[in-house]
Image: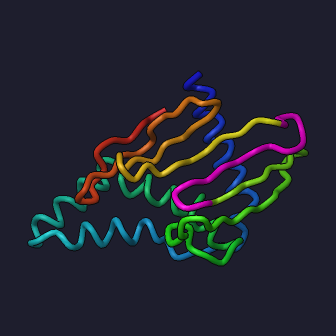
């Protein structure tokens, strides 16, 4: 079941990139926030050590991946930064990929994908920011899996590897 969930997340990511990333540069808001947190650490040695740790443990890679394939895509097509959404606001896009039509809805701290037509009709998945746990969670068929946990100081405390 976990393998299927991760396959769905990977497929959705590829779908997002194929459909939405044509000519998108974006502002990379999440990467800028993480980079600012690392830069705000007192002392050259401390910030340099945390910077190296972020590269070694793939923190920057995960953050750039989320920025590039999800946040910048939403920003490109909607014209608004999904990290700056207010409660009650939403953005919805409908895309067709390989004969399947998907409805993608972005709300504050959440992305929902639902297949409305095609061979995967009725399937859905979500990417959710859990502010209390400071964790990005992938959810499908009621099964949630933590993807990335971010500490109070902005450090990555856990990354789920498929």
x and y, in percent, of residue 75 in the image: 62, 72
x and y, in percent, of residue 69 in the image: 60, 58
In terms of image quadrants, where is residue 72?
bottom right
State the predominant SS element of the stretch in magenta. Answer: strand
Membership of 110 in magenta stretch: yes
x and y, in percent, of residue 113 in the image: 70, 48
How has the structure been colored for display? rainbow
- On the rendered structure, is 78 left or right of 28? right
In terms of image quadrants, where is residue 18?
bottom right
Q: Magenta segment range?
A: 107-121
In the image, residue 11 sits, relative to residue 60, either above or below, namely above
The residue depicted at 16 percent of the width and 59 percent of the height is 49
- On the rendered structure, is 49 left or right of 145? left
The residue depicted at 52 percent of the width and 33 percent of the height is 144
- On the rendered structure, is 142 left or right of 91? left
The residue depicted at 52 percent of the width and 76 percent of the height is 27
The residue depicted at 32 percent of the width and 69 percent of the height is 35
x and y, in percent, of residue 107 in the image: 60, 60
Membership of 9 in magenta stretch: no
Question: Which residue of the protein is positioned furthest toward the top in this rendering?
Answer: 1
Work out which quarter of the rendered image holds the N terminus and state it. top right
Label total for image: 0
In terms of image quadrants, where is residue 54?
bottom left
In the image, residue 44 sits, relative to residue 133, either above or below, namely below
């Amino acid at each position: 079941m976990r393998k299927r969930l991760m396959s769905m997340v990977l497929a959705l990511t590829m779908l997002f990139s194929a459909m939405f990333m044509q000519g998108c540069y974006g502002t990379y808001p999440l990467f800028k926030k993480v980079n600012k947190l690392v830069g705000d650490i007192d002392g050259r040695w401390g910030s340099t050590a945390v910077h190296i740790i972020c590269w070694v443990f793939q923190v920057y890679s995960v953050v750039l991946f989320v920025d590039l394939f999800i946040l910048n895509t939403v920003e490109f097509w909607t014209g608004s930064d999904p990290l700056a959404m207010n409660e009650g606001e939403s953005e919805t896009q409908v895309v067709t990929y390989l004969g399947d039509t998907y409805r993608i809805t972005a709300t504050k701290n959440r992305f929902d994908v639902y297949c409305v037509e095609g061979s995967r009709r009725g399937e859905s998945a979500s990417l959710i920011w859990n502010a209390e746990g400071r964790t990005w969670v992938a959810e499908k068929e009621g099964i949630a899996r933590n993807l990335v946990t971010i500490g109070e100081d902005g450090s990555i405390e856990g990354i789920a590897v498929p």
